[in-house]
Amino acid sequence: MKKIIYLLIFLSLFEYATAQSVNDTKDFISEQIKANPPLSNYKTAVFFDNNVLKADAERISNRTLSESNYNNTFIFIYDIFNNSGSLYFLTKAHIIDIRDIIKISTTKISDNVNYYNISVYIGNSYFAKEYTNSKDNDPAWKYLDKMEISIGDNYEASQKIKKAIIHLGKTQGITIKDGDIF
């Protein structure tokens, strides 16, 4: 009987430690992306089930989410403001299911400014949409073939985010390929 009690306590502690690891990973991804906006007039955020209400996730994705879909929601959102930061121009959100991630890669973009683009490739087995809302047009949703996360000119942060997303996949039982290995 004692062995069964010890086993139950051990399994409970293991489950708690794993849950913390998943939430810690999600928090880390959110914090790193928010701390590294691609431009000063961009405001970025990441939402998972641990930092967004189900009703808000449903509003952004424009659909009713099952509990399983809500628990695997991954939303990258950015707002673009004018240079003074006071006038909003555009909001875009990429909404995917964590279980659908198959590969992730990073690319340095050198346009007028330098920034990193983190491409999260999806398998199209689950919901994947891009939401766009501008001050001049009605909100629109369209099919999304990959999530594009832009961050500032910070190589180290791009690699940490990529590794954290790969780790998040492992915690969910998913193998995510590192697309930068090739």
Image (tube, rainbow, N blue to C red):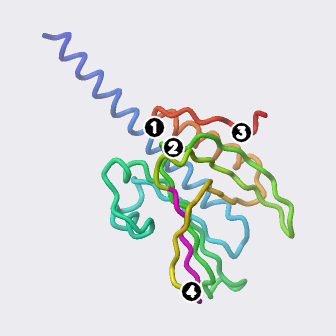
Could you say where residue 61 lies in the image, as x and y percent from the top left?
Answer: 44, 65
Query: Three-letter amino acid code at disc 4?
Result: Asn
Query: Three-letter amino acid code at disc 1?
Result: Ser
Considering the numbered disc 2 on the image, is that residue within a helix, a strand or a loop? helix
Secondary structure of the magenta portion, mostly? strand
Magenta residues span 128-136
Q: Of tags 4 and 3, which is closer to the observer?
A: 4
The residue to which callout 3 is attached is 179
1 or 4: tag closer to the N-terminus: 1
Q: Of tags 3 and 1, which is closer to the observer?
A: 3
Above or below residue 136? Residue 168 is above
User: CA–CA distance between discs 2 and 4?
Assistant: 36 Å
The residue to which callout 2 is attached is 25
Above or below residue 131? Residue 71 is above
Q: Are marks 2 and 4 in contact (CB under 8 Å)?
A: no
The residue to which callout 1 is attached is 21
3 or 2: tag closer to the N-terminus: 2
Between 117 and 10, the one nearer to me in the picture = 117
